[in-house]
Every structure is written in structure tokens, then in C-alpha cells.
Image: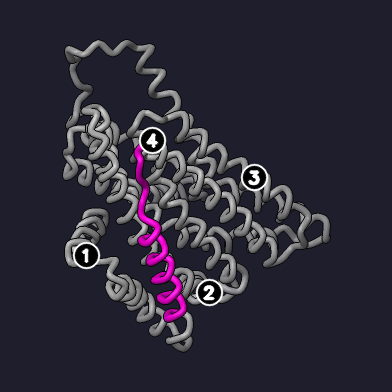
Amino acid sequence: MVNGQRRFLMQAAFDMTSATLRTLGLLLGAWLALRGLGSGPGGSAAGFVISAALVLLIALVVVGTGKTGPASFSLSKYLAFVAPLLVGQLLLNLLLQADLTLLGRFASEAARAEGAPLTRADALVGAYRATQMFAFLPYQVLIGITFILFPMLAAAALAGDTAAIARYVRMGVRIALLIAGAMVSVTVGLGPRLLALLFGEEAAALGGRSLGLLALGFGCFAIFGILTTVLNSLGRERQSAGVTGFAVAVVAMLCFGRVRGAPLGEELLWLTAQATTTGLLSATLLAAVLVYRAAGAVTSASTLLRTLLSLAVAASFARLAFPPGKLLTLVAAGLTPLVFMGVLILTRELGKADLQLIWTVIRRRAS
């Protein structure tokens, strides 16, 4: 509701409150449950549920439930509109967890087949989960763009302003490409070193190769999130849900076809990353076609090529320019996005106005 009213500062306040309460709920719930029951996970789950309920109550008090307006919008029409959105969100959450869930199953099967302890399968799943935490970052950052883009596109569609729709889509996808590319260049170039820095050498040895590929896949997924937002904004909710279901199906089929039956080891993670990246890339390309048909625009080929070139140069810089070391890894992680931006400036893809807009989006999401 607040996004539809363009009250973005209030939405940011709700995001901040939700994140703070969620963190407190997880930590405090685990601590209390550990002291009282001797087990922390159940307390964390309860803390999460309580924090979500508190945010809902705060939203109801601050925003309210709204009032009936003059427009005639029946319950059946409302459900017809909301149902595809709910299905799409369900499929989206399934897509976020499909590869990890299937990897856990196939790793356990491989451990039993080889007579190995299940702890070896747990180590593989844990390493893959660590790679996901880095790979998800572009999508989490670009959620801020969807909050702005949705009401703008919906208003333009209601007014029948096709020129504005095309302009908003080109702007949103282009900025998303540039932000995602800057972040992906770091994880592609420094994948094993980032894992070693936060999760140890074992996680780096198991998931380092997979992280580079998975980062590209979830970079596509970040753009996919923008494209499905465009489809939802333009009344193409069924297409949005359909292309998300397509992604889930491709990832699942490739995991069953290639990952299942593989020997227990690092190759399981690599094959899972291949399946996930292929599914996400395929779905993103399909979503781009659907958006072009609906809006008459996506982004220019030159922008895409320059972004890919900048990503390749920045990732190569991160991988080759710095010797191993924790401090140098942090320095490389800070300098790599600057190299990415520098190549964009040299190729005349970025100007001063673009840099100001990107900084505004990043600062808003960080707050």
C-alpha cells in the first residue's frame, strides 16, 4: 500500500524495523531457548515468528487497512488479480531453495552409496549454502529498485502512456544491470578467497569453483526479479508466474539429470551450480522476451555488451592483481567495483548523472 502511494521513506522504515526485529528475535529466541530448554534452533524459529507478527501489527497501526473507494472492484476481480501473484511468489521462493534442497538429497544418497558418513554430505551442503549467501547479494540489493519501479509502471499502464512504460523499463533494467555487474565482478573474481575469509579453507576448497559460476547465475536472477516486476506491473501476472515456474522446472530437471548419481565430492557442487545457472539464465532470457513484447523495450545491446566487458575486466583484475591474504582480499573487494565502473566510464556507458542515481539506490537500500 505504501509503495503504491509512493511513500518510499515509510517503506524503508518498515524494512529497517523488520530487519532489526528479525535479528533480535533470532538471537534472543535462541539464547532464551538454549537457557530454558537446552536447544536453540526452536527458539530462533519462535523469535522469527514473533518478530514478523510485530511488524505486521505495526504496519496495521501505522498504515491501516484502507477505505472503500469509488471504484467498483469486486472480490472476484481482486482474487483473479492476486492469485497469479501469490503463485508467482510461491514459485519464486521454491526457486530460491530448489538447488540447495536437491543437493542435500543427492549428497545424502551419494554418501549412503559409498558407505561414507552423512557428515560428509552435510559439509558439502554447508559449503554450497555459503556460496549462496554471496550469490544472493545482487538480488537482495536490487529489491529496492522493484519497490520504486512497480508503482511507476502501474501508473503509466493505467494512463496508457506507452512511451513512459518503455522509458521506465529501459531505465530500471539498465541500472539493475550496472549494479548487479559491479557486485558479481567481486564474487566471480574473488570467490574462493571470500569463502575462505568468512567460512574457512574447507568451504573455499569445496565451494570456491562453484561460487564463480553461481554468482553469474544469481546475477541473472537479480535481473530476472526486475523483469518479473515489470510483467506484474503491466498486468502480466500469469506470464510472470509461468516464467518463474519454467525456471524451477529447468533447475529441477537438470539437477535430477546431472547431479543425481554423481560421486560424493566437490563435483556435486559444481554440477548443481551448472544446473542452477543454466535454469536462471534461460528464464531470464525468456522473461526479457516477454517484457519486450509487453513494454516494447528492455535495454540496449550496447549496454549489455559493455556491462559484460566491464565485468570480465574487473573480475580478472580481482583474480590476478592481488596476491593471497585476508587484508588484500578486502582491498581487492573494495577496488574491484571501482574498476568495473572505470571501464563503463571509458566505454562511455556511464555518465555523471548515472553515478549519482546508482549511489542513491545503494544508499537507500543500505539505510
Q: Residues within 10 Å of mark 1 (few under 14, many from 20)?
A: few
Query: Quadrant where the C terminus lies?
Result: bottom left
Instruction: Identify the mark nearer the N-term, 4 or 1.
Output: 4
Q: In whole angstroms, how far apart are the C-alphas of marks 4 and 1?
A: 29 Å
In space, the residues marked 3 and 1 are separated at their CA atoms by 39 Å
Q: Which residue is mark 1?
A: 355
Query: Which percent across, then down, holds residue 85?
Result: 42, 30
Mark nearer the N terminus (1 vs 2):
2
Q: Main secondary structure of the magenta part?
A: helix
In this picture, is 360 found above or below 52? Answer: below
N-terminal of the pair, mark 2 or mark 3, is 2
Q: Could you say whether the residue bearing mark 1 is in a helix, strand or loop?
A: helix
- Amino acid at dot 4: Ala
Q: Which residue is mark 2?
A: 192
- Picture residue at 38% right of the left edge, 84% below the top: 327
Q: Amino acid at mark 2?
A: Pro
